Amino acid sequence: MQMTISLNTMFNMLQPLSPSNKKWLADRLYEDIKRQKKIVSKELVFPHLPADFKVSAETHEGTIGHLPKGVDFEKETEKMWEEWAK
């Protein structure tokens, strides 16, 4: 059986608690809020590269190089997004 009580009623029920018990409860509530925020916000964090960052020779050699003449990169990218959206 579930019961619903208003926050005002709950607050009034907690008034007789000692200050140390209120602090304990508040700490647990803040910990729960922080835990829930971590679960909800899976924010992507990207590293910040310095302005003078240079790609290593090994990485540069691993790329495919220049696109062939006549290939429209913007058009190909748009087609890719349309295919992914299907």
Image (cartoon, rainbow, N blue to C red):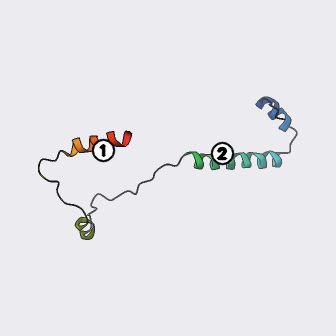
Residue named by callout 1: 80
Q: CA distance from mark 1 to mark 2?
A: 40 Å
Residue most extreme to the bottom: 58
Q: Residues within 10 Å of mark 2 (few under 14, many from 20)?
A: few
Seen at 46% across and 51% down, the residue is 44
Label 1 secondary element: helix
| Mark toward the viewer: 1 or 2 | 1
Q: In which quadrant of the rendered view does residue 49 lie? A: bottom left
- Where is residue 9 drawn, in percent x and y? 82, 30
- Where is residue 5 drawn, in percent x and y? 80, 30
Amino acid, disc 1: Met
Label 2 secondary element: helix
Which residue occupies the foreground of this view, 83 or 8?
83
- Where is residue 67 drawn, in percent x and y? 17, 54
Which residue occupies the foreground of this view, 17 or 58?
58
Q: Is residue 17 above or below residue 48?
A: above
Q: Is residue 49 above or below residue 76?
A: below
Seen at 72% across and 45% down, the residue is 29
- Where is residue 59 drawn, in percent x and y? 27, 66
Seen at 16% across and 47% down, the residue is 71
Amino acid, disc 2: Ile
Nearest to N terminus: mark 1 or mark 2: 2
Residue named by callout 2: 33
